[in-house]
Image: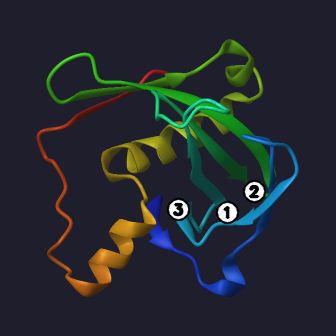
Amino acid sequence: MGFVNRMLEEDERREYVLDYPSKGIRGKFIGGTIDDENDVRLFNYANGHKGKMEPCDIYSFVFDYKGKVFFVHLRQRIPCGNDVHWSFASNSDKNKFTESEIMFLREAMKVYAYHGFMINEWNQLKLNPLAITENDECNIFIEF
């Protein structure tokens, strides 16, 4: 079936111990970019530098690959127009993965990057199904 952005039922949620912005924070995500068939999940949980309040171009994700959990920081660049480029924020993040894991992360990002998963948008969608539209003029480039 592949990846979809969706809510998770209570019994589908897993607890993760996050490493950013502070180590040891426990959390369960209520939704994200999910591939049920292959048991792969992607959750965006932070944007911005530790200790600073303003958002930046680096996003922190939990990437759960068949129960093997990675914390990865990806950079989003919008160099011109509607082009959106995603890449690893550092080589140390890239070196964590096998080629198979990179392939699944790339596929997850293709789905996440187009629309993403924002809980406030999902709450709005429940109230008004026509509230969210996708930008079909956007070009996504996954650079890993």
Q: Tag 2, which secondary structure? A: loop
Q: CA distance from mark 3 to mark 2?
A: 15 Å
- Numbered mark located on residue 32 in the image: 3
Residue drawn at point x = 55 percent, y = 29 percent: 74
Image position of 132 (left or right of 14) = left
Q: Earlier in the sequence, mark 3 or mark 2?
A: 3
Residue 80 in the image: x percent, y percent?
19, 18
Q: Earlier in the sequence, mark 2 or mark 1?
A: 1
Query: In the rendered structure, are the residues bearing label 3 and label 1 in contact, judged by CB atoms less than 8 Å apart?
Result: no
Q: CA distance from mark 3 to mark 1?
A: 13 Å
Q: Is residue 95 above or below residue 26?
A: above
Using a 10 Å C-alpha cutoff, classify the residue at mark 3 as few (fewer than 14 neighbours), some (14 to 19) or many (20 or more): many
Residue 109 in the image: x percent, y percent?
47, 42
Using a 10 Å C-alpha cutoff, classify the residue at mark 1 as few (fewer than 14 neighbours), some (14 to 19) or many (20 or more): few
Please tell me whether mark 3 or mark 2 is closer to you in this view.
Answer: 3
Query: In the rendered structure, are the residues bearing label 3 and label 2 in contact, judged by CB atoms less than 8 Å apart?
Result: no
Q: Earlier in the sequence, mark 3 or mark 1?
A: 3
Residue 79 in the image: x percent, y percent?
26, 16
Residue at the spot of label 2: 66
Q: Quadrant of residue 43?
A: bottom right
Amino acid carrying label 3: it is Gly
